[in-house]
């Protein structure tokens, strides 16, 4: 019976990993190799080499950059939390309380990342409609 419970737990963990991976890769944006401003025919590069200001001051671009920076920070924080939890788990030395703390930290980090990813997806969807 214990063997079956271990198999079920193994498949639940793998399913959770697959779902999280799918969410991560499905929420990422497509990046073009040439950029999105192909109609300007190199005018931005020429103006930039001449020392002129080529940046736009549109508020939506500024907000988008701020959101991008915040999401980068959250991604780095998630990575650090996962490293810390893995370190706790590997150095438990039979201490069940430390293993439980590491598992709880991993669960909380993954749930937080999913919530932030879904919030970004909803914001991106609504922003695309507007």
Image (cartoon, rainbow, N blue to C red):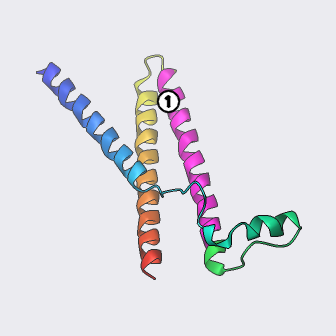
The residue where tag 1 is placed is: 86
Magenta stretch: give its range.
63-90
Number of labels in the image equals 1
In this rendering, would 65 be left or right of 19? right
Is 118 situated above or below 40?
above
In this rendering, would 117 be left or right of 1? right
Q: Quadrant of residue 40?
A: bottom right
Q: Secondary structure at mark 1?
A: helix
Q: Is residue 20 magenta?
A: no
Q: Kindly tell me whether residue 25 is visible in this rendering.
A: yes
User: What is the residue that sits farthest to the right in this orientation?
Assistant: 51
Q: Residue at x 72, y 79 (%)?
A: 57
Is 59 situated above or below 106?
below
Q: Kindly tell me whether residue 111 is visible in this rendering.
A: no
Q: Quadrant of residue 106?
A: top left
Instruction: Tell me residue 12's x, y (percent).
Output: 24, 36
Q: Is residue 67 magenta?
A: yes
Placement of the N terminus among the 4 image quadrants: top left
Q: Residue at x 40, y 33 (%)?
A: 100
Q: Residue at x 42, y 79 (%)?
A: 129
In this rendering, would 9 be left or right of 51? left
Is 73 situated above or below 12?
below
Asked whether 69 or 38 is in front, the reply is: 38
């Amino acid at each position: 019976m214990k063997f079956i419970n271990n198999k079920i737990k193994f498949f639940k963990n793998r399913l959770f990993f697959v779902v999280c991976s799918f969410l991560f890769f499905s929420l990422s944006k497509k990046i073009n190799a040439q950029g999105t401003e192909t109609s300007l025919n190199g005018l931005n590069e020429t103006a930039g080499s001449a020392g002129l200001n080529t940046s736009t001051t549109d508020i939506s671009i500024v907000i988008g950059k701020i959101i991008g920076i915040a999401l980068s920070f959250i991604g780095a924080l998630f990575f650090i939390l996962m490293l810390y939890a893995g370190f706790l788990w590997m150095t438990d030395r039979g201490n069940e309380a430390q293993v439980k703390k590491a598992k709880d930290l991993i669960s909380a980090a993954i749930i937080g990342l999913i919530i932030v990813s879904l919030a970004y997806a909803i914001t991106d969807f609504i922003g695309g409609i507007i």
